[in-house]
Image (cartoon, rainbow, N blue to C red):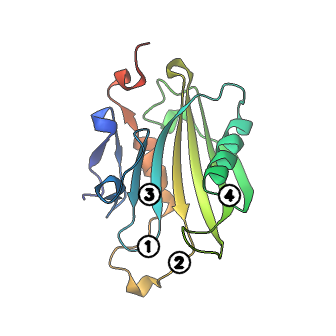
């Protein structure tokens, strides 16, 4: 996959620039309709783009924390720890015309993989883009588990925060009908 190619998401309703080597997880296993999931070909890194119902009862930084803790609950995290939460500049987003509020959160969650007892600290970076006119919270997550291979063993280098930032800033809406009748 070309690193600078806009990749269609959600049947072409959105597009975004994905990092080099991103593999569509839906080619490997079922993925919920409200998610697009990509994995690194060598590391255990993953990227998730989710269309979620707007959580209007939480605002600002609290909304970013809410979604981080919710993901931890879904994944059965034994511990969740927020490292930082910062507002994202709307001017840098391709979605600036319909995004009212945007937040970037970094944190750690202690998660055990399926069928494993030992929980590992996984670093998560999340971008929350709030689209209230569509009753939608758009959550982008970059999972960075501990490295299992040294860099010398990687045919494709690990993804960086810069790759995630490019995904977030390049995310573009092409068809608002994905949100249903407005």
Q: Position of residue 78 (x, y in %)?
A: 72, 63
Mark 2 vs mark 1: which is more N-terminal? 1
Question: Compared with residue 148, is residue 126 higher up or lower down, i.e. above or below?
Answer: above
Quote the CA–CA distance across marks 2 and 3.
17 Å
Query: Residue at coordinates 58% horizontally, 74% vertically from top-left?
Result: 116
Q: Position of residue 52 (x, y in %)?
A: 53, 34
Mark 4 vs mark 2: which is more N-terminal? 4
Q: Position of residue 123 (x, y in %)?
A: 62, 64
Query: Residue at coordinates 45% horizontally, 31% vertically from top-left?
Result: 95
Mark 4 crowd level (few <14, some 14–19, many ≥20, 10 Å Cα): some
Quote the CA–CA distance across marks 4 and 3.
18 Å
Q: Are marks 2 and 1 in contact (CB under 8 Å)?
A: yes
Q: Which mark is residue 147?
A: 2
Mark 4 vs mark 1: which is more N-terminal? 1
Q: Which residue is mark 4?
A: 107
Q: Which mark is residue 163?
A: 3
Mark 2 vs mark 3: which is more N-terminal? 2
Question: Compared with residue 53, is residue 151 higher up or lower down, i.e. above or below?
Answer: below
Q: Quadrant of residue 151?
A: bottom left
Q: Quadrant of residue 81?
A: bottom right
Q: Quadrant of residue 83?
A: bottom right
Quote the CA–CA distance across marks 2 and 1.
7 Å
Secondary structure at numbered mark 2: loop
User: Depth-wise, is mark 3 or mark 1 nearer the camera?
Assistant: 1
Q: Which mark is residue 43?
A: 1
Q: How many numbered callouts? A: 4
């Amino acid at each position: 996959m070309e690193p600078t190619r806009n990749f269609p998401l959600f049947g072409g309703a959105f597009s975004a620039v994905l990092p080099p080597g991103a593999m569509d997880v839906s080619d490997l296993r079922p993925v919920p309709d409200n998610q697009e999931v990509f994995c690194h070909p060598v590391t255990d890194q993953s990227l998730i783009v989710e269309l979620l119902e707007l959580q209007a009862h939480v605002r600002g930084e609290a909304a970013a924390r809410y979604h981080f803790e919710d993901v931890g609950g879904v994944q059965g995290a034994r511990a969740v720890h927020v490292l930082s939460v910062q507002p994202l500049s709307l001017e840098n987003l391709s979605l600036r015309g319909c995004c009212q509020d945007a937040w970037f959160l970094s944190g750690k969650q202690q998660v055990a993989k399926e069928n494993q007892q030992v929980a590992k600290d996984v670093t998560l970076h999340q971008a929350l883009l709030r689209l209230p006119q569509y009753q939608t919270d758009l959550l982008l997550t970059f999972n960075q588990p501990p490295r299992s291979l040294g860099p010398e063993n990687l045919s494709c280098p690990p993804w960086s925060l810069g790759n995630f930032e490019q995904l977030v800033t390049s995310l573009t809406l092409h068809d608002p009908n994905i949100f249903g009748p407005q």
